[in-house]
Amino acid sequence: MGNGIGPALEARDVLAVLRGQAAAPADLRARACLLAGELLELGGAAAQGQGRAMAEAILSDGRALVRFMAICEAQGGFREPPAAPLRHALTSSSAGIVSSIDNRQLARIAKLAGAPSARSAGVDLHVKLGQAVDKGEPLLSVHSEARGELDYALAFAAANSQVIAVRAG
């Protein structure tokens, strides 16, 4: 779900959904509305089969963001997620279709980059399964707070070049 792997990158995705931004991950929005809808039905706030529509309305009209900000305020205030000072994009070596994404290797790259202890570190995915890509197009970006951790993550990615596989299309 979403595009980011790592605390700040995941929080960025959630905030984009709450804020209704055009670039918000559609898969994360859909899953959030599905789960929230089921909870609304389970708790009796929505009739059976109406929870998802209610959740969509609450998200779309801004009530979800207002409530989120109130919760943050009650817990000490809201802060924008930090951005990592070091970033490096990994690009496609050929044109084609994204045929597989190895989540375990992505998680390993994020961990080597410093996530989750380095809050702004992680991996930002730029593609989805089945997406057409051009040669040289960014597939993912590695975010890190330290040069050594970025280097470790990039070395691992280079040794595991099929983290995101692209087949000729």
Image (cartoon, rainbow, N blue to C red):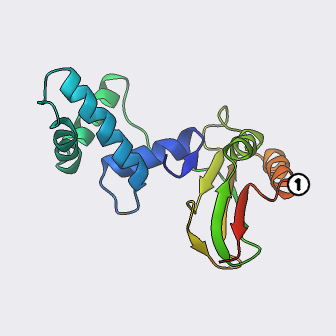
The residue at 49%/49% (across/down) is 2
Place of residue 4 in the rendered image (x, y in percent of width and height, measured from the top left): 55, 48
- Quadrant including the C terminus: bottom right
The residue singled out by tag 1 in the image is 159
Q: 89 left or right of 45?
A: right
Sort mark 1 into few (<14), some (14-19) or many (20+) by Cα contacts within 10 Å: few
As drawn, the residue found furthest toward the top would be 43
Residue 137 in sight from this viewpoint: no
The residue at 83%/53% (across/down) is 160
Judging depth in this view, the residue of 102 and 60 nearest the camera is: 102
**Number of callouts in the render?**
1
Judging depth in this view, the residue of 69 and 44 nearest the camera is: 44
Place of residue 16 in the rendered image (x, y in percent of width and height, measured from the top left): 38, 52
The residue at 80%/44% (across/down) is 149
| Picture layout, residue 47 above or below residue 42 | below
Going by the numbered disc 1, the residue's amino acid type is: Ala
Q: 102 left or right of 31?
A: right
